[in-house]
Image (cartoon, rainbow, N blue to C red):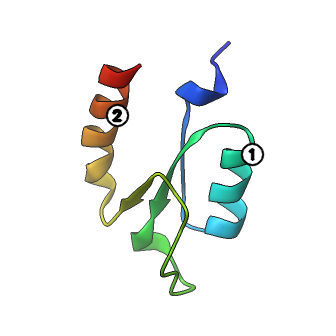
Amino acid sequence: GVNSENILMVGDWPERDVVGAKKLNMKTAFAKYGDTFGTEYSGADYDLNDISQLLKIIEKENINA
């Protein structure tokens, strides 16, 4: 029962995770710390160096909702 624009997809494979989530109108966060491909541009709304950064992103998104 949650609208896709209110979902944040976190993934470490841009071509699969970010692209797929964007097609469903989800917000996206690229987990750079899990990237094994050397991705330079993820196309995500957010790039994460550490999982703890999610807290600020969720806070920001909740304020903007």
Left or right? Give the position of 33 relative to 56.
Answer: right
Whether label 2 touches label 1, CB < 8 Å: no
Helix, strand or loop for disc 1: helix
Q: Quadrant of residue 3?
A: top right
Query: Which numbered dot is residue 23?
Result: 1
Q: Quadrant of residue 62?
A: top left
Q: Nearer the viewer, mark 2 or mark 1?
A: 1
* Residue drawn 27% across the image and 51% down it: 53
Q: Is residue 1 above or below residue 24?
A: above
Q: Which residue is mark 2?
A: 58
Image quarter in which the N terminus is found? top right
Q: Is residue 52 above or below residue 50?
A: above
Helix, strand or loop for disc 2: helix
Q: Is residue 40 above or below residue 27?
A: below
* Total numbered badges shown on the rendered structure: 2
Residue type marked 1? Lys
Residue type marked 2? Ile
Mark 2 vs mark 1, CA separation in Å: 20 Å
Of mark 2 and mark 1, the one earlier in the sequence is 1
Q: Position of residue 30 (x, y in %)?
A: 48, 61
Mark 2 closeness class: few <14, some 14–19, many ≥20 residues within 10 Å: few
Q: Position of residue 37 (x, y in %)?
A: 57, 85
